[in-house]
Amino acid sequence: MNLGNVRVLLTGAAGGIGAATALALARAGAQLAVAGRTGAELQKLCTGIGAHGGKAQPVARFLQATPINVGDVFDAS
């Protein structure tokens, strides 16, 4: 699967299933904004993704169940 032209906002990415999903998406070529409440863990994940040639930006914030513009999240990180 090639996700080279896809931008993904992944919430809950600081650990567990979210981190594993981020790694899988990055391997497929997606550009990621990984969100969660633990900034240090997000940065560690992004560093690991970058070390393998992927692109990921950490977004350390709590995303509430309200509509958001995903493009704004990419632009702010």
Image (spheres, grey):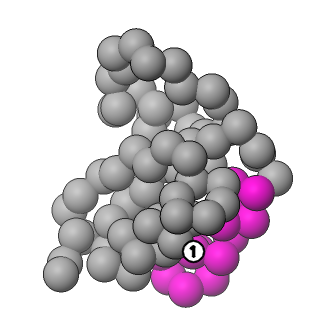
The residue lying furthest to the top in this view is: 66
**Residue at 57% of width from left, 54% of height from top?**
13
Dot 1 corresponds to which residue?
49
Is label 1 in a helix, a strand or a loop? helix
Q: Is residue 31 left or right of residue 55?
A: left
Residue 56 seen in render:
no
Instruction: Identify the image quadrant of the C terminus.
Output: top right
Residue 61 on image: x %, y %: 65, 30
Quadrant for residue 69, please give it: top left
Is residue 47 on the magenta stretch?
Answer: yes
Given the image, on which type of amino acid does mark 1 rest? Ile
**What range is drawn magenta here?**
41-54
Residue 76 in picture, x, y percent from top left: 53, 31
Q: Which residue lies furthest to the front in this view?
A: 17
- Residue at screen point 41% across, 26% down: 72
Q: Residue sitting at 74 percent across and 65 percent down?
A: 44
Q: Position of residue 1 (x, y in %)?
A: 18, 81
Q: In which image quadrant can residue 31 be found?
A: bottom left
Where does the image place residue 42, in percent across and percent down from the top left?
Answer: 69, 55
